[in-house]
Image: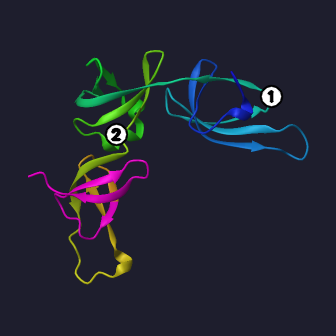
């Protein structure tokens, strides 16, 4: 148990038997009354957002998650099959557990799966992924410097801004934390 003033962004809390990920916190000291912690939480079970206010003296249970490296294998129905890289066990994850990671789900990608009491509760994609460009506008000769980027749709369906020289079929590396283009990757052909 921790006091409410120790709550930090990124922690996982157990409130009324449910797990919540802390997205944001602020310590509020009003002119009158008691200080409190204002938090924005995401319920892990159904991904809903909640604003929650804790009094400074409130005690809260911090949940500890085990992170296991797992490789994405294939989709089976509406679930996604991952394999534990240590013991080769396979588990199925739902789109709710994978969340935004669906944008980076390509065969053999290694995700960090968060487990709580033996059950998966979240999945984080690798920091950098390489994806193929499946749709983008052609390079426009004489384009001004202000129009230095253009939208490109990648093989997973996500659309990001890329430099003008990127063309259909290129493989690019992007940062999954900011959903941002990093560089073009040389073809493996």
Residue positioned 89% across, 47% down in the render: 31
Residue positioned 38% across, 48% down in the render: 176
Few, some or many C-alpha atoms within 10 Å of disc 1 (few <14, some 14-19, many ≥20)? some
Residue positioned 35% across, 26% down in the render: 93
Residue 5 position within the rendered picture, expressed as x and y whole percent measured from the top left:
74, 34
Along the horizontal axis of the image, is 183 left or right of 112? left
Residue 55 position within the rendered picture, expressed as x and y whole percent measured from the top left:
79, 32
Residue identified by numbered label 2: 102
Residue 82 position within the rendered picture, expressed as x and y whole percent measured from the top left:
29, 26
Above-or-below relation of 42 to 87: below
**Residues under numbered marks 2 and 1 in contact, where contact means CB atoms less than 8 Å apart:** no
Label 1: element kind: loop
Residues shaded magenta = 161-189
Above-or-below relation of 182 to 147: above
Residue identified by numbered label 1: 57
Examine the image and state in which quarter residue 110 appears.
top left
Which residue is farthest front? Answer: 86
Along the horizontal axis of the image, is 176 left or right of 163? right
Examine the image and state in which quarter residue 183 appears.
bottom left
Residue 132 position within the rendered picture, expressed as x and y whole percent measured from the top left:
21, 52
> Which is more toward the observer, 28 or 78?
28
Which residue is farthest bottom? Answer: 142
> Which is more toward the observer, 19 or 176?
176
Which residue is farthest left? Answer: 189
| Label 2 – label 1 distance at C-alpha | 39 Å
Label 2: element kind: helix
- Quadrant of the drawing holding the N terminus: top right
Along the horizontal axis of the image, is 100 left or right of 82? right
Residue positioned 22% across, 73% down in the render: 139
């Amino acid at each position: 148990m921790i006091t409410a003033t120790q709550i930090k962004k990124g922690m996982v809390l157990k409130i009324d038997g449910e797990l919540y990920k802390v997205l944001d916190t602020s310590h509020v000291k009003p002119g009158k009354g008691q200080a409190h912690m204002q938090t924005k939480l995401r319920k892990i079970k159904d991904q809903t957002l909640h604003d929650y206010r804790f009094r400074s003296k409130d005690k809260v249970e911090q949940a500890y998650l085990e992170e296991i490296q797992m490789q994405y294998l294939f989709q089976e129905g509406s679930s996604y099959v991952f394999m534990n890289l240590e013991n080769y066990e396979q588990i199925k994850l739902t789109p709710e557990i994978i969340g935004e990671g669906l944008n980076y789900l390509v065969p053999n990608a290694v995700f960090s799966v968060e487990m709580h009491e033996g059950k998966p509760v979240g999945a984080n994609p690798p920091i950098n992924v390489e994806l193929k460009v499946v749709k983008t506008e052609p390079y426009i000769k004489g384009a001004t410097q202000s129009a230095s980027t253009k939208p490109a749709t990648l093989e997973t369906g996500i659309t990001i801004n890329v430099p003008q020289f990127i063309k259909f079929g290129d493989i690019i590396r992007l940062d999954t934390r900011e959903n941002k283009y990093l560089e073009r990757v040389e073809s493996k052909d």
